Image (cartoon, rainbow, N blue to C red):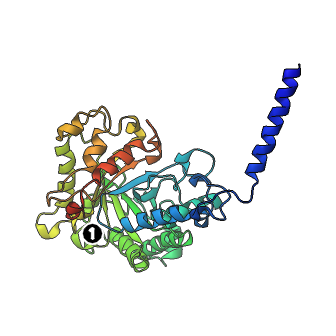
Amino acid sequence: MKMLKYALVAAMALASVACSKWTDDERLTFDNQKDLKRAIPFIELTSADQLTAEQQKYYSELRAWKQTPHVRGFGWFGGWTAKGTDPQKYLRMLPDSVDIVSLWGTHGSLTEAQKTDLKLFREVKGGKVLLCWIVQNLGDQLTPQGKNATDYWVTEKGGGNFLEGVKAYANAICDTIEKYDLDGFDLDYEPGYGHSGNMATTTAWISETGNVNMYTFIKTLYDRLNPKGRIVVMDGEPYYMDRATSKMVSYYIYQAYDEATTARALQKLENGGTFGYDEEDYLDNWEGKSFLTLEFQKYSKTGGFPRYTSSNPEIQKLDAGRQIMDYATMLMPNGKRIAGIGTYHMELDTEGGSYRFLRQALNAGNRVSDTQKADFQ
C-alpha cells in the first residue's frame, strides 16, 4: 500500500512537471512555427493562411511546376462531400501531381465545406476543377424540374430559335462555372456509345456546316470561358470534331478502359487524332493534347484492365498497375510523352494506400533528368 502511495505521488509530480513544460512560454520554436500553436493536418485546413512558411514555399513551387510541360494527372471525381475523415472525399487530399479534376455527379449548389475544399485545391495545389456531364440533348442536367426541355430552352430562352436555345444553355453552364469559380467544362460527348440526341450524332462532324448544334454549343462556351483563362475539354469521342472546332478545345480525353495492349491504346490515340481523310482534317495538335484514361469503377484494385499486356518488359513484370503505368510513360509518334492520363472514379483508388496507382504512374511518367525536359508537351 505504501508503495502504491509513493507511486501515485511520483506520478503526480511528473505530471506537474510535464504540464509545466507544455505551457512554458519560452519553449523552443523554429522560424516557420512562430505564432503557430500546432501543425494542422491538411484535411483540417480552412484557409491557406494556416500553412507554415515551409509549406507555402513548397506549394508555390508545385504551382509553378504545373505551368511547365509534363504528364498531367486527371480524373473524374465522384462522391465529393468534403466532410468527415475519409481523404477520398476531399479534392485537397488528391495527390499533388493531379492537375485537373472533373466533378462527376456534381452540378452546382455547393456546400460551404465543398467551397472551402475547392478553394484549397485550386489556390494551394494549383489544380483545375471542371464541371462535367454527358451532353446529348439540349438542356441536359440544367432543365428546371417539371419543364419540357424544348419549351424551356427553345421557346422561353431562345425565342423559338433552336440555336439561340443552345446558346442560352451554354451560357447557363458558364453562369454556374463563374458562380462557383470553377475552371471550365468537360464535355462528355458519346454519340457512338449510346448517347446520341439532338446535340450529339455520329452522322455529322461538329462544324459550322455539319453538327451545327454542338458547334454552336462549344463556340459559345469557348467565347465565354477562354477570355477569363478557363478551358473546354472533350472526353469520349473527340474525333467527331473538325479541325477548326478542335482548336477551341484544350484537351482530348479518351476512355481507353478495356484496351488490352500498348499497341491498342496507342492506336486509339492515333485513330482519334487522325480521324479525318486528310492531314488538314486532323484534330489540332492531337499528339500534344491527348489524354488516356482508365476505368477505376471496375478496375481500381488492379490499377486498370487486369489482363493488360505492356510492350515494356519492366512494366509487364508488375503484378498490378500495368495499364496505368504504361499509359503514363507512353511516347507519342512525335517522340514526346503523352499529354496526360486519368482515371474514372479516381476516388476509388485505395488499394494499397490512398491513390497508390495514380501517384506511382504520374511519378514514373514525370521522372526524367533535366536534359530530357523537351520530351514533355
Q: Which quadrant of the view contains residue 5?
A: top right
Q: Residue furthest left?
A: 278
- The secondary structure type at the circle numbered 1 is helix
Q: Which quadrant of the view contains residue 68?
A: bottom left
Q: Is residue 21 left or right of residue 48?
A: right
Q: Residue furthest top?
A: 1
The residue labelled by disc 1 is: 246
Quadrant where the C terminus lies?
bottom left
Comparing 317 with 29, the one in front is 29
Comparing 82 with 235, the one in front is 82
Give the residue displayed 74% in from the left and 59% down from the top: 25
Residue 148 visible? The answer is: no
Residue 59 visible? The answer is: yes
Residue 18 percent coordinates (x, y): 75, 44
Q: Is residue 10 left or right of residue 330?
A: right
Q: Is residue 50 left or right of residue 107?
A: right
Give the residue displayed 29% in from the left and 67% down from the top: 211
- Type of residue at label 1? Ser
Disc count in the image?
Answer: 1
Q: Residue furthest bottom?
A: 227
Q: Counting other residues with Cα less than 10 Å from the Cα at mark 1, is it few (<14), some (14-19), or many (20 or more)?
A: many
Comparing 55 with 90, the one in front is 55
Q: Which quadrant of the view contains residue 8?
A: top right
Quadrant where the N terminus lies?
top right
Give the residue displayed 56% in from the left and 71% down from the top: 179
Residue 67 percent coordinates (x, y): 36, 68
Residue 186 percent coordinates (x, y): 40, 62
Residue 42 percent coordinates (x, y): 57, 54
